[in-house]
Every structure is written in C-alpha cells, then in structure tokens.
C-alpha cells in the first residue's frame, strides 16, 4: 500500500468518529444478534463479546486517541555519515500487510484497525464467527470512512473464512502477508504457528503468577490478589496462580483468611499437596499440567514455595510469560524477582491487571506480545512499524 500523509489518515479517523457515533444503535443491535446466538457456557468469551453504549464509547475513545498521536512512520532513528561520505539514515517504516486472528471481542475490529491504518499498514481482520454480525457492521463503518476520503476499502478488510479456509490461506495466502498476530488461546496460537508461512507475533495467552513473599504486607497481598483474579476474568492479564512462601508469619491463618476472601467473590480454589494440609476441603491438583493452564474463569490455584528462588523457577517453568507480580516490602528482593522472572511485564506490589496499553500509557493496543522479537508487551501505535535504511551516495563503490 502507498504511503499516506498524516492529514489524510487523520481525516479518515475523524470520519470514523462521526460514523461510529451515528451508527451506535445499529452496532449494538447487531451485537444483540451475536449474543442471542451464543452459548453462554464460556462466560469469559461471552463477556468479551458484549458491545453496549460503554463499549462504543471506548471504541470512540480509542480512535480519537490514535488520531491525536504522532504519526509513527518516517521517524529518524539514526543518521550517520561514513568516512566515504555515504549518508546512512535509518527510519521507521510500515510493516505492509498485517493479519490479526482473534476470538469474540468486536472492539478489536476497531482498535487493531485504527492502529494498523495510522501506522500505514493494510490490515486483514479474521474475527470469530461468534461476533460475525457485530464485525460486519464495524467493517461497513470503516469502509464508509475510507471511501469518504477517497481511499480503497482494501486498507481494512474482514476475512470471511472458515477454519479449513483459514488454514489454507495461512499456507498459501492470496496476497502478501508480512505479519500475523494470533490473539487468543493456546489452540489458536498453535494453529497459526503450524500453518503460517510468514512472521508470527504471539499474543493473548496469560497464565499469570503472583508470589507472596515472607516479607509481604498481607493486607496489600489480599487486595491485589482479589483485584487481579476477579476484576475481569476474561482478560489475558487476569491472575491464575498464587505462590505463597511457607515462611510467611502466621502462614496457615493467613491462607485461611485468603480462602474466605476468595469464596466471598465466588472464586473456585485449587491447591497443591502442601496447601491441601491447610485447606483439605478444596480440590488438590492431580496433574501438574494444570500449572500451564490459563483459566479465564473464577478459578485460582494456590501453591506453596520455600524461597524466592523457588518461586522464580516455578514461574519461569509454567507461566505464559505475560505478567507476574511479587508482593514484598523488601525492595532488593523485589528487584531480584523482577530481573529474573521471564515475563513481558513484572510487578512489585501491584495487580497484573495493569498490563494493558491504555493503563500503561501506550494508548490503544493491537495485542499484548509475549514474544521477544520485535517487541514485548502492549503493541501500540509506535510498535506497528519496522525500520528501513536510506543510503545516500555520490557514486561510491566498495573496494
């Protein structure tokens, strides 16, 4: 796709703001069709599917925020003139065409597209069939905004493919693909990695851990655990596992207190064999593979560790490398934890729920990357560009 100037891109986004607000009722009505057809057994997926007035307001806020951000394309990274007088300028450049595959969440159809477009990328949107009616209306809104400003609808396109057709498209794309972002669970990520023939940037899997040190402020620990677990169970930044140091003062009493608090919030508690001695009435895990699971439910696994090193080793072995938190009043211990835990975001005395573009000051996000190349953490506007070298000479040849 050709390079667009910033004014044209922002004019499209201004049009989109007007269209989204005008079509608010149509969007919500289309979403009701999706909700009515959805089997509510998966509460987390159902929660992500809902579009109401608040959600439309959030879509509008995301478009406006990106519109007000600086254009990330064409920024100079470095400028060097060599002894042979070659001038080498490294600048930011668009990826080209991005494919994002995601389940449920119609708001991704807005957030992913606005970020990709402002960064001068074409985007192909493969939403889940459960959000079909919602996504079709949102695609129409995008197409109206593009055409109103003299641009092709191809900049933002919804793919209408079944699973087998998606597999074939990944293997033999009908148009060039530069980056694929699977935003969802382990099955989706593995599916894309198996069949894709271009770069894949993994996003979405949580399985986040929190470690309660023997030096923790217990009240602080309980408040953070409750928030991280119950604030939004469908979020990839929700808490799944809690590790508690057995040397914590009044260890058994505090674990029973935590149990009571969790039960007040209707959280299902699973325990390892050591914690089961204190909480025998709760299900003891029989299979260690559950340590790898992202629950996306009101469910929490509590385990015992004997040291900071034990906690770090457990987290690095089992976590999704998304977010991890330590509760401690010892700053040196916190830094050891944060330096050595292999996660995109590490926290000291705070909830994992803050791993989010808006909460971290990035703005709207395409996804949360758990990969290390080319970026880790929230993928905002400035992360949707690559780089390109411009080399200016005057007849130089290499000798």
Image: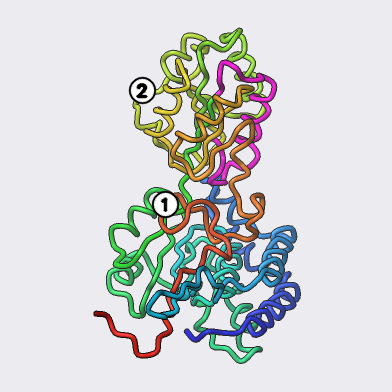
| Picture coordinates of residue 270, whole percent (x, y) | 48, 24
The span shown in magenta is 212-240
| Picture coordinates of residue 355, whole percent (x, y) | 59, 46
Residue 201 falls inside the magenta stretch: no
- Image quadrant of residue 166? bottom left
Viewer-proximal residue, 354 or 294?
A: 354
Location of residue 258 with respect to 291 vertically, above or below: above
Around disc 1, counting alpha carbons within 10 Å, would you say few (fewer than 14), some (14 to 19), or many (20 or more)?
A: some
Location of residue 16 with respect to 187 vertically, above or below: below
Nearer to us of marks 1 and 2 is 1
Residue that badge 2 annotates: 286
Label 1, label 2: how far apart the Cα atoms are: 30 Å
**Of callouts 1 and 2, the N-terminal one:** 2
- Image quadrant of residue 265? top right
| Picture coordinates of residue 268, whole percent (x, y) | 55, 28
Secondary element at tag 2: loop
Residue that badge 1 annotates: 371
Q: Which mark is residue 258?
A: none
How many numbered marks are there?
A: 2
């Amino acid at each position: 796709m050709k390079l667009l100037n910033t004014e044209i891109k922002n004019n499209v986004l201004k049009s989109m703001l007007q269209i989204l607000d005008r079509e608010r009722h149509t969007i919500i009505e289309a979403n009701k069709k999706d909700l009515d057809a959805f089997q509510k057994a998966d509460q987390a997926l159902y929660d992500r599917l809902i579009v109401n007035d608040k959600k439309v307001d959030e879509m509008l806020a995301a478009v406006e925020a990106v519109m007000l951000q600086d254009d990330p394309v064409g920024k100079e990274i470095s400028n060097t003139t060599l002894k042979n007088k070659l001038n080498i300028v490294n600048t930011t450049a668009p990826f080209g065409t991005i494919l994002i595959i995601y389940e449920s969440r119609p708001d991704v159809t807005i957030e992913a597209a606005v970020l990709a477009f402002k960064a001068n990328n074409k985007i192909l949107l493969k939403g889940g069939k459960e959000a079909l009616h919602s996504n079709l209306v949102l695609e129409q809104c995008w197409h109206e905004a593009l055409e109103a400003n003299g641009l092709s609808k191809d900049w933002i396109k919804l793919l209408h493919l079944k699973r087998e057709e998606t597999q074939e498209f990944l293997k033999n794309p009908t148009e060039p693909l530069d980056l694929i972002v699977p935003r969802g669970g382990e099955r989706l990520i593995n599916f894309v990695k198996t069949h894709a023939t271009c770069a894949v940037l993994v996003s979405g899997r949580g399985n986040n851990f929190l470690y309660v040190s023997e030096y923790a402020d217990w009240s602080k620990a309980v408040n953070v655990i409750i928030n991280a677990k119950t604030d939004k169970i469908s979020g990839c930044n929700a808490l799944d596992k809690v590790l508690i140091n057995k040397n914590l003062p009044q260890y058994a009493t505090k674990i029973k207190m935590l149990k009571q608090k969790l039960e007040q919030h209707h959280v299902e508690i699973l325990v390892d064999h050591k914690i089961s001695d204190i909480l025998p009435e709760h299900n003891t895990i029989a299979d260690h593979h559950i340590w790898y699971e992202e629950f996306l439910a009101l469910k929490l696994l509590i385990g015992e560790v004997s040291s900071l090193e034990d906690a770090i080793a457990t987290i690095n072995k089992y976590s999704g490398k998304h977010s991890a938190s330590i509760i401690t009043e010892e700053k040196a211990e916190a830094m050891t934890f944060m330096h050595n835990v292999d996660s995109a975001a590490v926290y000291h005395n705070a909830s994992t729920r803050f791993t989010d573009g808006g909460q971290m000051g990035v703005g709207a996000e395409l996804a949360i990357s758990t990969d290390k190349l080319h970026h880790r953490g929230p993928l905002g506007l400035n992360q949707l560009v690559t780089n390109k070298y411009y080399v200016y000479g005057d007849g130089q040849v290499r000798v």
